[in-house]
Every structure is written in structure tokens, then in C-alpha cells.
């Protein structure tokens, strides 16, 4: 697997300060994609052990709240297979930090039969805290949305969803909620 970029201090793709890994490779081809160059599976640099160590080192900083996976498409089967051993290490070393994943696939596609579902998908999902799902849709683009680009996308609480057997949305902490203005 290749990766397109690493952001060591990201505040746009999940709550708090995060380490974000932008993987290469995506078959969706969404019009208006903000990272179109990363759709190519060969784009960027190889995801090596040294890259993984750099990410783990960045995650060790006390002010970093977690890891975010973006793309490209982390849930392409070949990317899932490459990322799974790394995610296991992140969970083992930093159980208190959360893991977010952005995917053009819906949770229903990932949990059911689809081109994204493979032999590692179930374990991969078990290591996530939050999934922002659904393809980016240019006509539904809205810059006011929290942690997503278009209004069709959902921010899913993965452990609660897996436990309940139905999609349950992530609830942002109070600092991220819009204040209610009373007339």
C-alpha cells in the first residue's frame, strides 16, 4: 500500500488534535473529490515499517487524541489488509486514543456484501471508534457540516452500531455542538 500524506497535527478530521494518514487508492471517483490525486493506488510513498513507527511516535504525544484514516479510500480491500496489522498495534499501544476512518463506502456496504467487504473487514471495523461513511456528493457539499464534506455522509459510532446491529450516529462532545439560541 502507498500513502499520499501524513498530517502530524490535524484538527479538521475528528475532535481534538489528531494524526491523520491519507492512504492512496480509491475506486469511487467522486466528482469534486478534495484529494483526487490519491485515487491512484501508486500515488505517494510506500507504507513501510518506518512510516508506521513515525505514526506511532506522533500518536505517543499526550496532546494527540487519536488517529484518522482518510484517502484515497482506507476501506478498499487491499488497503484494509495493509492497514490492519498497523491498527492492531495502535489499539494495543494506545487504547485510550480513538481511531476514525473516512470511507466512501456506507456502513451497510461494509457490513454486508459489497466490493469493499473482504476477509479482514470485520476485524478492521472492530478496531474503529468512528466511521464517516458515504461518497462525497458535490451537490450536497456544505462547509458548515462537522467533520464531513456533504450532507449524505454520516458520522457513525462503530462500537455502538456493531452492538445494536443498526447504524447509530456518533454524538459530538459539548464543545462541538452548536449552541441553542432562544428567541
Image (tube, helix red, strand yellow):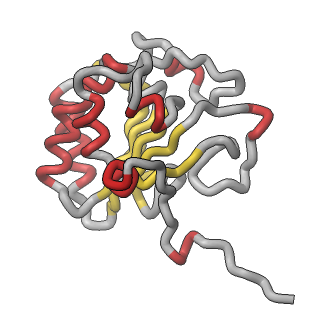
Quadrant position of residue 135: top right
Most extreme residue toward the bottom, as rendered?
A: 183
- Left or right position of 105 against 99: right
For the N terminus, the image quarter is top left
Q: Is residue 182 visible?
A: yes
- Residue farthest right in this picture: 183
**Residue at (23, 63) in percent of width and height:** 96
Q: Quadrant of the C terminus?
A: bottom right
State the residue at coordinates (20%, 36%). 86
Q: Quadrant of residue 82?
A: top left
In this rendering, position of residue 26 left or right of residue 139: left
Image: 6 above or below 93: above
**Between residues 159 and 74, which one lies in front from this camera angle?**
159
Q: Is residue 30 left or right of residue 56?
A: right
Residue situated in front as seen by the camera: 86 or 126? 126
Residue 99 visible in this rendered orientation of the protein: no
Q: Position of residue 111 (x, y in %)?
A: 38, 33
Work out whether residue 9 or residue 16 is closer to the camera in this orientation and state it. 16
**Which residue is rendered at x = 50% and y = 44% of the image?**
132
Q: Is residue 146 above or below residue 125?
A: below
Number of marks: 0
Residue occupying image coordinates x 56% and y 19% = 28
Pinpoint residue 108: horizontal percent, then vertical percent: 47, 35
28 to 96, vertically: above or below: above
- In percent of width and height, residue 92 lies at 12, 50
In which quarter of the view is residue 45 placed?
top left
Amino acid at each position: 500500500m502507498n500513502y499520499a500524506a501524513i498530517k502530524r497535527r490535524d484538527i479538521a478530521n475528528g475532535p481534538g488534535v489528531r494524526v491523520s494518514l491519507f492512504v492512496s487508492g480509491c475506486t469511487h471517483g467522486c466528482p469534486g473529490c478534495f484529494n483526487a490525486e490519491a485515487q491512484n493506488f501508486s500515488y505517494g510513498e510506500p507504507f513501510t515499517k518506518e512510516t508506521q513507527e513515525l505514526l506511532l511516535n506522533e500518536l505517543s504525544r499526550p496532546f494527540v487524541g487519536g488517529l484518522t484514516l482518510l484517502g484515497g479510500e482506507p476501506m478498499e480491500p487491499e488497503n484494509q489488509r495493509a492497514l490492519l496489522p498497523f491498527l492492531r498495534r495502535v489499539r494495543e499501544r494506545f487504547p485510550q486514543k480513538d481511531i476514525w476512518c473516512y470511507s466512501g463506502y456506507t456502513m451497510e456496504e461494509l457490513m454486508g456484501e459489497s466490493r469493499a467487504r473482504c476477509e479482514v473487514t470485520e476485524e478492521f471495523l472492530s478496531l474503529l471508534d468512528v466511521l464517516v461513511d458515504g461518497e462525497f456528493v458535490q451537490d450536497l457539499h456544505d462547509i458548515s457540516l462537522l467533520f464531513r464534506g456533504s450532507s449524505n455522509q454520516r458520522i457513525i459510532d462503530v462500537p455502538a452500531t456493531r452492538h445494536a446491529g443498526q447504524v447509530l450516529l456518533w454524538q459530538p462532545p459539548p464543545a462541538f455542538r452548536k449552541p441553542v439560541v432562544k428567541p
